[in-house]
Amino acid sequence: MEKPCSVTTSELLEKWGCDLETLHKLGLKFLKDKEGKAFHLGYDQKCKLLAFAQQVSHGPFNPDLHGNVGVLDVIGKDRKIAWQKLGDMSRETAMLSFVETLNSACPLFHACVEAHKKEIEMKAEKVKSDLEFQMREQERLKIEAEEEAKKQAQMKEQEEKRKQIKEALNLQTYDQFKTYAEQQYPENPDQQAILIRQLQEQHYIQYMQQIYQQQILSQNFTKTEDSEFSQELPLDVEAAALNALASIQNIPLEPDNFSEASANDEEEFVADIVAASMWTRKDIREFKDSVYKEGKDSIIKVGHGETVTVRVPTHEDGSCLFWEFATDNYDIGFGLFFEWTKSPTEQVSVHISDSEDEDDEDDENVLEDDVEQGGNNSSHSALIESNRPPISIVIPVYRRDCQEEVYAGSHTYPGQGVYLLKFDNSYSLWRSKTLYYRVYYTR
């Protein structure tokens, strides 16, 4: 009987790094795949390895179970003898002996086991990596779902705010727009309703743009005041618009209160001035023809480098100012201001000034910035300080493409005073502009 292998299982595991069953299976596969290709065994070594394999698979040799081989089967007889020599060798000892014999006969087997270990480690690492990726993906999807839910909630909240703003603006301007629509389409309720909706939508867009500009300017002012806290601040335009609307819901419009108010009271009223409404129309040719037929007093030639100021006092029977204007061929700057003074007359007057000859000191403050940049507009209701009566900026001066369509607008009287419609051509060095305009009030 052949002596059992002297290497213990624990020593073998420490040497090879895998369990005995796995090591034996690797040896059988290596022997089947590589013998005769990567290495060659002697006859006795083959018989011995096969005997160990039989001992592992079937236990000790039993003639009654495993039978006899033929007389002429020399190879089978030698293998049977090698198996019989193992006697009662245990299965574990047979596996250890098989591995040691194979490793002694072919050192490449050790490299094969190492490669197998690396493959197992890579698979385990891949499983771990895939699990981590799945966890990260689940976390990402969870975060995205939370952000999407938050975004939807914010959009719903903003939509609700927009709805409130539109309802408040429509409530303020409906009577004005209805009066204007009745003048444009008399005895045509359907067209009046369409025009009112268009005006309300344009008024909402312009109002939100003004609020947005105020928020931007306010943010820039805050950053300039305290450079240590110069990070970007979120712009909640809808909330600011709602606050602005809430602040002007109950503004008194009594002229007597205004004329007798102190300077501090004037500043409070000016700060709460209502935003103007502006819209455009495509019927520019018809508008010019109608203005021409009404008389040439409403047609003005604005020379290059000049600014025309149309002064329109508030009317005691009126509550809202309307204006319309267009030009030939080229654009022109337009802005609306309100002078807090009691005019001795209700007549409309026109004043023309050159860019180098400012006729009013307060005008210099109003238009000291380039009209291309929209003027110096810290707020649409900013108060202009001077020795003259205080002036509020209702609409800052911007260049308008009024050669392509009619620009129109309205503004609710904030009190008793004089509206200043500024038509600015100071930026033009060579071109004069022909201006067609119309102003009127409604009750």
Image (cartoon, rainbow, N blue to C red):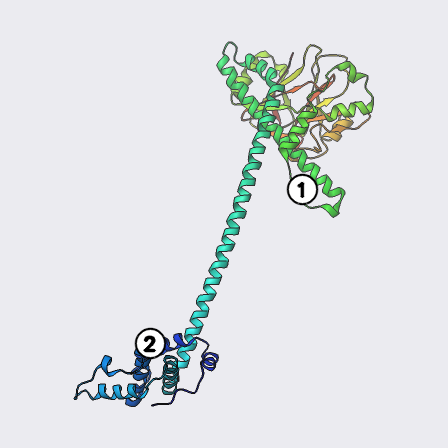
**Residue 322 appears left or right of 270:** left
Left or right relative to 209: residue 311: right
Q: Tell me which label, 1 or 2, sits earlier in the chain.
A: 2
The amino acid at mark 2 is Lys
**Identity of the amino acid at label 1?**
Leu
Image spot of residue 356 (x, y percent): 73, 31
Quadrant of the image containing the N terminus: bottom left
Q: Is residue 289 left or right of residue 413?
A: left
In the picture of the structure, the residue carrying the numbered disc 2 is 29
Give the residue number, with chain letter if any, for mark 1: 233
Q: Nearer the viewer, residue 429 or 215?
A: 215
Where's residue 370, x and y in %? 68, 35
Which residue is found at the position 32% from the left and 81% from the top? 55
Where the C terminus falls, by quadrant? top right
Give coordinates of residue 10: x percent, y percent. Answer: 47, 80
Nearer to the camera, 195 or 133:
133
Q: Residues within 10 Å of mark 2 (few under 14, many from 20)?
A: few
